[in-house]
Image (cartoon, helix red, strand yellow):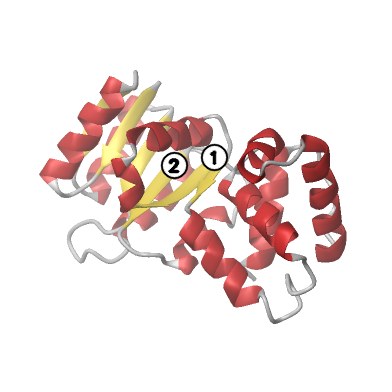
């Protein structure tokens, strides 16, 4: 799987490159800024891009803007964005086009190389990989306004894991319940949130996240 990395810190950029190579990824370019990212994506046509939100020169949201521009130029380009802090607006902007193949993780997650590699593969395959802390904040913010306030504690757990991009089987294993139980919870969640059920897990997760991000 071919990867482009955009990270301004040399040590982290080099560390990401080595880690991904150790997991069988081919890092075809590792750049330090937005223009470099766009040029690398245009020339290399990678399977997935790993992008730091904050890149030179202002270190605000150049990385995110470059990633969004790349997805406009190459619709559906899988992008996994890394951030030092939780920025709910960034997560919502990534999900806004509803096409999937996006991830938003805190940089702390990079230190677990197996989980990070798994998240990157999930994004490259068209799924989502949202940081649990981002999901927790979205849920907490919407808990009292009727959007998710009617969900049971267990349904909120299931919703959070769904939003991370977990399959029903993975949710069942995490919560020590059966897949049948998870299916019942998801059906109840969609009914309460007035969302149309779907057999497409990615579209289902994106719909929930879009609803929570309103």
Q: Is residue 6 left or right of residue 92?
A: left
Quadrant that contains the C terminus: bottom right
Residue at (48% x, 37% y) in the render: 78
3D distance between C-alphas at marks 1 and 2: 7 Å
The picture places residue 60, in percent across and down from the top left corner, at 28, 66
The 10 Å Cα crowd at callout 2, few under 14, some 14 to 19, many 20 or more, is: many
Query: Which of 123/60 is in front?
Result: 123
Quick check: marks 1 and 2 in contact, CB under 8 Å?
A: yes
Q: Which mark is residue 45?
A: none
Q: Secondary structure at mark 2?
A: strand
Q: Is residue 98 visible?
A: no
Q: Quadrant of residue 62?
A: bottom left
Tell me: residue 157, above or below residue 7: below
Q: Nearer the viewer, residue 12 or 182?
A: 182
Whichever of labels 1 and 2 marks the residue nearer the N terminus, that label is: 2
Seen at 19% across and 36% down, the residue is 15
Q: Which residue is mark 1?
A: 101
User: Which residue is labeled 2 in the image?
Assistant: 79
Neighbor class of circle 1 (other Cα within 10 Å; few <14, some 14-19, many 20+) is many
Residue at 74 percent across and 72 percent down: it is 147
Check the image and report above or below for 128 versus 65.
above
147 up-or-down from 78: above or below: below
| Left or right of 162 on screen, residue 3 | left
Q: Position of residue 125 (x, y in %)?
A: 55, 29
Q: Secondary structure at mark 1?
A: loop
In the rendered image, the residue lying farthest to the left is: 10
Q: Quadrant of the N terminus?
A: top left
């Amino acid at each position: 799987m071919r990867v482009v990395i955009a990270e301004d810190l040399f040590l982290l950029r080099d560390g990401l490159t080595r880690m991904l190579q150790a997991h069988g990824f081919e890092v075809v370019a590792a750049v330090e800024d937005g223009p470099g990212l766009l040029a690398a994506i245009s020339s290399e046509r990678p399977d997935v891009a790993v992008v730091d939100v904050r890149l030179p020169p202002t270190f605000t949201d150049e990385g995110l803007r470059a990633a969004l521009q790349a997805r406009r130029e190459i619709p559906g380009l899988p992008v996994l964005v890394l951030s030092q802090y939780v920025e709910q607006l960034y997560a919502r902007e990534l999900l806004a086009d509803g096409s999937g193949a996006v991830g938003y993780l805190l940089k702390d997650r990079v230190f677990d190389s197996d989980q990070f590699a798994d998240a990157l593969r999930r994004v490259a395959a068209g799924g989502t990989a949202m940081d649990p802390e981002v999901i927790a904040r979205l849920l907490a913010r919407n808990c009292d306004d009727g959007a998710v306030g009617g969900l049971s504690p267990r349904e909120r757990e299931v919703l959070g894991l769904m939003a991370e991009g977990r399959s029903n089987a993975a949710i069942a294993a995490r919560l020590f319940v059966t897949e049948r139980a998870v299916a019942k919870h998801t059906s109840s969640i969609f009914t309460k949130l007035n969302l149309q059920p779907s057999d497409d897990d990615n579209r289902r997760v994106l719909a929930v996240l879009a609803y929570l991000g309103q």
